[in-house]
Image (cartoon, helix red, strand yellow):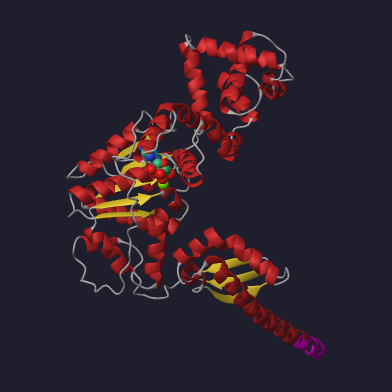
Amino acid sequence: MTTTSTETVPVQSTAQQTNHDTFQSALSHWANIRALLRDEMGETAYENWVRPLELIEIENPVAKLKAPTRFLRDWVLSRYANRLRELWTSQSNNQITDIEIHVPTTPTNENTPRTANEFAEILSDKSPNVVRQENFTLSAPLDPRFTFENFVVGSSNELAFAAARRVAEAETVAFNPLFLYGGVGLGKTHLMHAIAWHIKKNAPNRNVLYLSAEKFMYQFIRALRFKDTVSFKEQFRAVDVLMIDDFQFIANKESTQEEFFHTFNALVDHNRQVIISADKSPANLEGLEERLRSRLGWGLVADVHPTTYELRFGILQAKAEKMKIHIPQDVLEFLAEKISSNIRELEGALNRLVANMTLVGRPITLATAQDSLRDLLKANDRRLSIDDIQKKVADHYNVRVTDMHSSRRSRTIARPRQVAMYLVKHLTQHSLPEIGRNFGGRDHTTVMHAVKKVEELLKTDINLQEDVQLLQRSLQG
Ligand code: ADP
Ligand code: MG
């Protein structure tokens, strides 16, 4: 017995000593990590997200940190978890390779209101008047170019445009919410700003609040941190139109979603207009809570499709006109055909040509355009590989991808193969011999023949037209 205890005591105390040392050195790692993060993130982000974190315990290989709120924890984990792990690993010489962030079970401050039944109270004027401590600037700046006048309408965006106009012009709530969705750079933000501008101009006493979902979350967490959620929520009291851009950001962020859900319901209950944009429809957004998903679909859901050639051409014309610069027709056609991924890139290309002309005196011709946009065009092509196209086409016609390379000539296989060659020719920069090589080592004349054949058929065959359009859209979307 005695031997055991005399033996164990020193062991324990060494262990305690070691733990103590470990924690001491972890504290100094943590100080280093924070200093590095401060440089990387900048002062504001650092103050908001890292400063409130506290190192509480080391349990090799895990560093346990404490965050004052769930919001803060979720945010840090979603954005900085990897970086934190990396830094811990390198600072501790591989002793600590993972982190956990804990949140105290009792709120750090009981005055911090958690959700938003209380928010509804604020809207309905039941809550005591709160003196605002700090003036949050909730609304994000609006781009003066993003107006309805500057928005070119085509078949791909006409529904979204009409819905946006309707909401902007309506004096009462039109549909709640208006949910706009579609791919990157297709005009969602433009339409939201246009709504805001329109209302500001024509109904200046209506209060419009526009912000990104990210900012919504950021501001809310900030309010929690400064124990000022009441005035945060109070901001919404006077809002007639709330717009949240890039809503997908909130997917998977449970607590922010919950907060938003209450905000949203309170506004809708009080007949305020809500407008939301996202990259997917409510049904397809991942990480959305079910009740929020279904609620978001109650109003009008309008999508912006990938652009058509005509729309791209129209946008280029409108921009050139606005800049009062003459751009040769063939250059506009070239751009509209080649830069199909999104409108932001299309504008970028045009701006580059104009800059080349006004700054370096390079005239805008088809040749100079091809030359100065080479890298951009390549990037546009790179997104679509021959493989992608073959796979899509094979799927569409229900044939095997290997049939694209095979020498079988039965029509059910030869036609899809020709369509695939046609699409590769039109959607990428590959040469005919290259294309031939990728279709089972065929000769370039075979490819040329296939492309011609499809072009010929497209003039009369409506089914083929539909197939090709569909394929093209889904490949470029
Ligand atoms: P999203 O929010 O869908 O990613 P944006 O609204 O930011 O896209 O649009 C990207 C760019 O393309 C902006 O400069 C915008 O003005 C322009 N743009 C988009 N659609 C149109 C359109 N139909 N007419 C004119 N410009 C457009
Ligand atoms: Mg946007």
Q: Position of residue 368 (x, y in %)?
A: 55, 35
On screen, residue 425 above or below 100: above
Residue 263 lies left or right of residue 420; in this view the side is left
x, y percentage for residue 63? 62, 71
Q: Residue at x 21, y 68 (%)?
A: 127
Residues drawn in magenta: 1-10
Q: Name the one closer to the observer, 423 or 28.
A: 423
Residue 319 visible? The answer is: yes
Give how far across and how far down residue 251 sits, in percent. Answer: 45, 50
**Does residue 207 show up magenta in the picture?**
no
**Which of the 4 quarters of the picture holds residue 408?**
top right
In this rendering, the answer to whether 431 lies above or below 54 is: above
> In the image, is residue 7 part of the stretch drawn in magenta?
yes
Q: Can you give x and y, in whole percent of width and height, for residue 295 in the image?
A: 33, 45
Horizontal arrangement in the rendering, residue 106 relative to residue 338 (left or right)? left
At 40% across and 58% down in the image, what residue appears?
215
Ligand 1 is found in the corner quadrant, namely top left
Q: Residue furthest front?
A: 361
Does residue 96 appear in this view? no
The mark total stands at 0
Question: Is the residue 224 above or below the residue 78 in the image?
Answer: below
Magenta stretch mostly in which secondary structure?
Answer: helix
Q: Nearer the viewer, residue 123 or 444?
A: 444
Q: Nearer the viewer, residue 375 or 366?
A: 366
Question: What residue sits 23% from the left and 60% below the top?
Answer: 237
If the image is split into quadrants, where does the N terminus sit?
bottom right
